[in-house]
Amino acid sequence: MSDKYLNLVNSPIGAKVAATIGLPRPVVLRRFTAGQPIVPGPVLLGSTSGEVPTALTKIVNGAGAEAVTEPQEGARWGALILDARSVAAPADLATLRAFLTPRLRSLAPSGRVIVLARAANGADVTVDATRQALDGIVRSLAKELQRGATANLLWVEDEASLESAIRFFLSGRSAYVDGQPVLLGPGTAPAPEDWEQPLAGKTALVTGAARGIGAAIAGVLARDGAHVIAADLPAAGEILAKVANKINGTTLHLDVASPEAPAKLLAHLAEHTGGLDILIHNAGITRDKLLANMKPEQWDSVLAVNLESQLRINAALLDSDQLRDQARVVSLSSTTGFAGNRGQTNYGATKAGVIGLVRSSAAAFTRHGDSTINAIAPGFIDTEMTSKMPLATREVARRMSSLQQAGLPIDVAEVVSWLASPGAGGINGQVLRVCGQNLVGA
Amino acid sequence: MSTSRRAAIVGGNRIPFARSNGRYAHASNQDMLTAAIDGLVARFGLQDERLGEVSAGAVLKHSRDFNLTRESVLGSRLAPTTPAYDVQQACGTGLETAILVANKIALGQIESGVAGGVDTTSDAPIAVNEDLREVLLDLNRAKTLSGRLKALGGLRPGQLVPSIPQNSEPRTGLSMGEHQAVTTREWGITREAQDELAAASHRNLAAAYDRGFFDDLLTPFLGLTRDQNLRPDSTAEKLAKLSPVFGTREDGATMTAGNSTPLTDGASTVLLASDEWAAQRNLPVLAHLVDAETGAVDYVHGDRRTDGLLMAPIYALPRLLARNKLRLQDFDFYEIHEAFASTVLTTLAAWEDDAFCTQYLGLDGALGSIDRSKLNVNGSSLAAGHPFAATGGRIVGTLAKLLHENGGGRGLISICAAGGQGVVAILEK
């Protein structure tokens, strides 16, 4: 459903009124459009060591953006990228301030701030404290940035996925990811032949694909080149067929919570594909009740669909010859998995459980031909489900993020597609929030 | 080019069947057939694909739907360059289209095709009264004012009653049920046996749904996710309470609404192809269509006992078996269309009858009995319903998947049709 408030404050009169009386002024976010420049202006590169790595310049230029190392007067920056991997003492952080402070006001709408850092490793307390301080800077800065601009932090343990991550965070694909850290580790992360079709030749399966976020994920995976198997309950088959036919995909009628689901899935893959490259665990249900009133079937069904199905299907796939090397699994968690939510002990259990699942199975997926498994935790996303919320609750929830608006299903789908891409092979066992830096569970 | 190969059945898709004036009351034949085709396209990724042909048809068809199948293809996600044509062989339509497409594949004329059928008894065509039609045509032909007035003078109030299509034979005026009632009585088919068969149909279909058998054979339509006629709790005892509706002019009538198929709306499709075409697309081969035979009886002038309207498959089968050097018992599954429970029972009784088989089928003796546990194991038309032209596609898809699940085997299909016709076919895995 459309965000009427967002539309209003982006109209000439509405903007004036909102500015005068100090109302929140969300902007229409820059989202990915094929053929558009990756970032709306030159990219200024800086380094706390004083020297910008040439690899970084190459990555930015390779993405079709203009990398600049000498700040120019009057420039309107599409993005500011600071390599802060050298910081070792609190005093070093001043270089970060010196780089960012004069340029924040000339950041373009929906511009980007990306900070590269090393993660604390327990070797030296001063170094660790300084490195961790970067997290606080980026999270705070993300709350200060306006007009759809975002700030995110890359913990660079290995550069395998650095190019893929820089491209993702510069582009409109990361529109609703704000104030988040991502750990880039080692892994097999080949650059795709065509960055516009990073999933070309891949076979992907999306559960819960008939509606909302699942349908959006299926659409983005297909747009990025994958053959998509859209899976959902048999009863959702009519709308599922429409989803599949729109994206030249195929349908699979599957109740992921049924005992036969893993076997049925494997049989389908064996008969219809040359193996699976990408699996998106998106199917999920809610049966909200206060724990004091929770019925066994409300508890059990949510656990079965949202968590147990993923455990069983992953185990079956890893045990089969149907999951290809360098496979990508992405599970849908939720900010509820971090923060909890009243009336959602069952749902919260599964969404936190999924976080445990991906962290715990990362090593097993690495052993499976350098595959990865990650989770994403959407915040408040406008869907059929949220359109049924009371107006006031919905309006408040929408403005509770740094971007002052709800995300769209496509915003979640873009992040899923990035984590599913070959270049994201260095990201494993991570949980990435897609919440516009929502206050909930921050 | 001259080759001969067996056509593969890749899979099927149908919409759940709805009771007449039920969930699909406002859906046209074209709506339903298009939905069934689009579900098949989605299941097998056939978007923008140019297939060899689509062959389908409807029994109750409005004249505006003269190109029903082609129009449905144009409205579907198949490539608009896929040719299509309509077939009409009453209840044999769906199976006949599968045979036609399979034959072209076998001959190497095409590599792939869709066979199907659709029928609505809710959105049925209504024609003007025959007398009124003649008056209107005279009016149209008249060239002068006086000629037109004269033509209009032929109008009578009674002509306003529309002509509604009827489920009756033009040459006898009897409905199909009344015809079958004669056959049922002649062959002494009991009420108990009919109700038992009907209950088994419901029980088997419900069990098949429960175990997910139809998950990849069916796509819901207009909110309907299962066949509307299915009554999982149906039993022979409950069915025994219904009053007879056919053959009631004589005592001892046995055919009720429960052991006869209801009027139904629905559509079905089957994807057929050469093995190579399927392999190139990573698609499975569920079974092959081996051979088929069509027969007909002279139900107009023939004998009450041996030439019943729905007895043609009885005559067609021996020819098919002989050609393929098979016995009636050489099958793992039997799909005998349940137009009426007594049709199935008459068919089996005739094949078991020594004298009949010798005298009328030209055999040395009876074809014999079949293992009844192999008959309509996932239910048939009594439970699913019977949208005339859509039944063949339902059965071909169901049997092909049964053989595939079984890991091999041979299945027999037998479908009776109006006009005293019948179609039988063999599938093999």
Image (spheres, grey):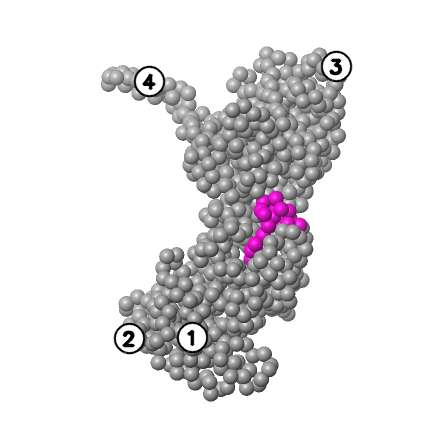
Disc sitting over residue A74 in the figure: 2
Which residue, given by chain and number where applicable, does mark 4 sit on?
B138
Q: From the image, state whether disc 3 or disc 4 is nearer to you.
A: 3
Whether discs 2 and 1 lie on one chain: the answer is yes
Whether discs 3 and 4 lie on one chain: the answer is yes
Which residue, given by chain and number where applicable, does mark 1 sit on?
A52
Asked whether residue B219 is drawn in magenta, I would say no
The amino acid on which the numbered mark 4 sits, given as a three-letter code, is: Asp
Q: Where, by quadrant of the figure, is residue A365 drawn?
A: bottom right
In three-dimensional space, the C-alpha distance between marks 3 and 2, rounded to whole angstroms, equals 103 Å
Element at badge 1?
Answer: loop
The first of marks 3 and 4 along the sequence is 4
The amino acid on which the numbered mark 3 sits, given as a three-letter code, is: Asp
The amino acid on which the numbered mark 2 sits, given as a three-letter code, is: Gly
Work out whether residue B175 can be spotted: no
Q: From the image, state whether disc 1 or disc 4 is nearer to you.
A: 1
Q: From the image, state whether disc 2 or disc 1 is nearer to you.
A: 1
CB within 8 Å, label 1 to label 3? no
In the rendered image, the vertical position of residue B348 relative to residue B302, given as above or below: below
Whether discs 3 and 2 lie on one chain: the answer is no
Could you tell me which chain the residue with mark 3 belongs to? B
The first of marks 2 and 1 along the sequence is 1
Element at badge 3?
Answer: loop
